[in-house]
Amino acid sequence: MKNIRNFCIIAHIDHGKSTLADRLLEYTKTVEGKDLQAQVLDSMDLERERGITIKSHAIQMKYSIEGEEYILNLIDTPGHVDFSYEVSRSIAACEGALLIVDAAQGIQAQTISNLYMAIEHDLEIIPVINKIDLPSAMPEEVEDQIVELLGCPRTDIIRASGKTGEGVYAILDAIINRVPAPKGDPDAPLQCLIFDSVFNSFRGIIAYFKVVNGVIRKGDVVKFIATEKEYEADEVGVLKLGMSPRSEIRTGDVGYIISGIKTSKEVRVGDTITHVKNGAKEAISGFEEVKPMVFAGVYPIDSEDFENLRSSLEKLQLNDASLTFQPESSAALGFGFRCGFLGLLHMEIIQERLDREFNMDVITTVPNVSYQVYDKKGNCMEVHNPSGLPDITLIDHIDEPYIRASVITNTAYIGAIMTLCLGKRGILLKQEYISGDRIEIHYDMPLGEIVIDFYDKLKSISKGYASFDYHIHDYRPSKLVKLDILLNGESVDALSTLTHFDNSVNFGRRMCEKLKELIPRQQFDIAIQAAIGAKIIARETIKAVRKDVTAKCYGGDISRKRKLLEKQKEGKKKMKQIGTVEVPQKAFLAVLKLD
């Protein structure tokens, strides 16, 4: 056990984690020859196309130093703020972390939040400055930032380059010398912490775990403490580039278990595996339930696909424990699911994966957040969906979630960023200079305002230099109104939103204009209205497609033309009564791209 090292790699998005992981695998000869490609651990096509890591990946390496062989378990993690849950799970299974900072960009917001998460779990932090081969690298300045943040001596900071391989051996030595060996008792009852799971259509559900105490062997009868289900361990093994079976996995090591589990509800990330006979009594603590931030309805385009969508979401949930969903129905879209996501990128990725991995065509409604609604009697209910609001006469007040946001940026962009935050009803708390021309600004902001396009706007006004991180802070009373969109007098529930009173008229007007562009013309007039309660605040009309019925009249009396026009008018009126307005999928996403 003293020769095992478990460590993860944490950093802001795009600081070169996956490339450095490739070099570690190459230098320890874990991956050789034709398997050696860029981003070895990013197994999804989507990850390679976008150049981001979505899923944490574990792999085992062997490295010898001074004639002694060490086992290194590496977990590569995502860097985007939407996938911070994946990072927290990886951190729970490790004793050390490589903190990677880009030599050209310096410390960014996500670096700081991931670092605090690692320090809370008492991990040994090894700071690494990556990409020092870049012409724009500023290793001296970045070193100052790291020393200020961590309070470590300069000699602890390793300079490296994932591209050229410089400094990789120094990192391997530091992992062996500085990261502590896992603590645990090989003779105690078995306790394994599940930190991930994947679905395999031939072998069922495969759970990845770290052995905290005891030993697990092939053929053992094991039990999952939270779900109280019992299984036989058909196969246990370690994670190399593929899965590599072993007869036993001992304390401190990381491995996988296949036991023919078919239903997704039986495996929970954060659960503990133990033996049925002489097993451990209590589970391992340290996992918190993830809280979704953004809610959206996901509906199948073809209503017969409802059950397929349910099983697809269950399989996705195994791969991504931060996805939550529950059934709901909508008058406009039929039956579907209310899904909770960690952010907008997360929502986009899930939609894309449903399409690619399960061939599901889905419509996603306007994303929103959860509100606490208090009625006149003082009772509180949580509302995720505007259509779930009680009658306006019964509501006393509505509380909306506020976040504590920190933005790190170059001083040149302060003005534009402050204007953006104030426009989103932000309250400035403080600003502090981190170094030279870098500043950290702290804001309290309503989560509902940043859900739709805040992150994209922040990136564009700061030319990509601002980094953003946030956590839920509290709920505060707010003057919110429900904005309904009516088509020919009928409300389309999938387009209704909760918005702040001050923004509602402007928002309603822009929605009507956008929908007028997107809804195709029909045989009858369509009135698009935005309403708050019974009050109409904006209206647009889509004119009917008309045939020129008077074309055959040349000369003659005007009453002849009028008769034909009246006849056409009657027909249009009748059509309007029985006709329904088809709303294209683009219209549901239009709200996201109003600007």
Image (spheres, rainbow, N blue to C red):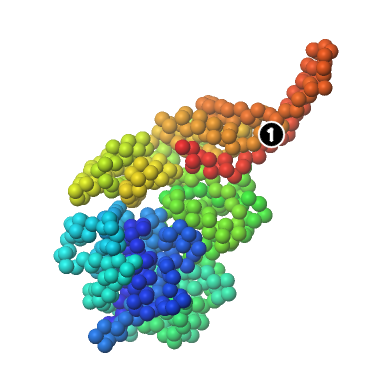
x then y, percent, for residue 157: 21, 66
Q: Tell me where residue 379 sits by quadrant.
A: top left
Residue lying furthest right: 556
Compared with 386, 177 (above or below) is below
User: Residue at 21% across / 50% down in the picture?
Assistant: 434
* Front in this rendered view, residue 99 or 252: 99
Closer to the camera in the image, 68 or 87:
68
Examine the rendered structure and indicate whether residue 589 appears above or below residue 33: above
Q: Residue at x 57, y 57 (%)?
A: 355
Which quarter of the figure has residue 416?
top left
Name the secondary structure under disc 1: loop
Eyeballing the image, is 170 above or below 381? Answer: below
What residue did someone put label 1 on? 522
Residue under the point 48% across and 52% down: 347
Residue 460 visible here = yes
Q: Quadrant of the N terminus?
A: bottom left
Image coordinates of residue 450 in percent, x first then y, are 40, 43
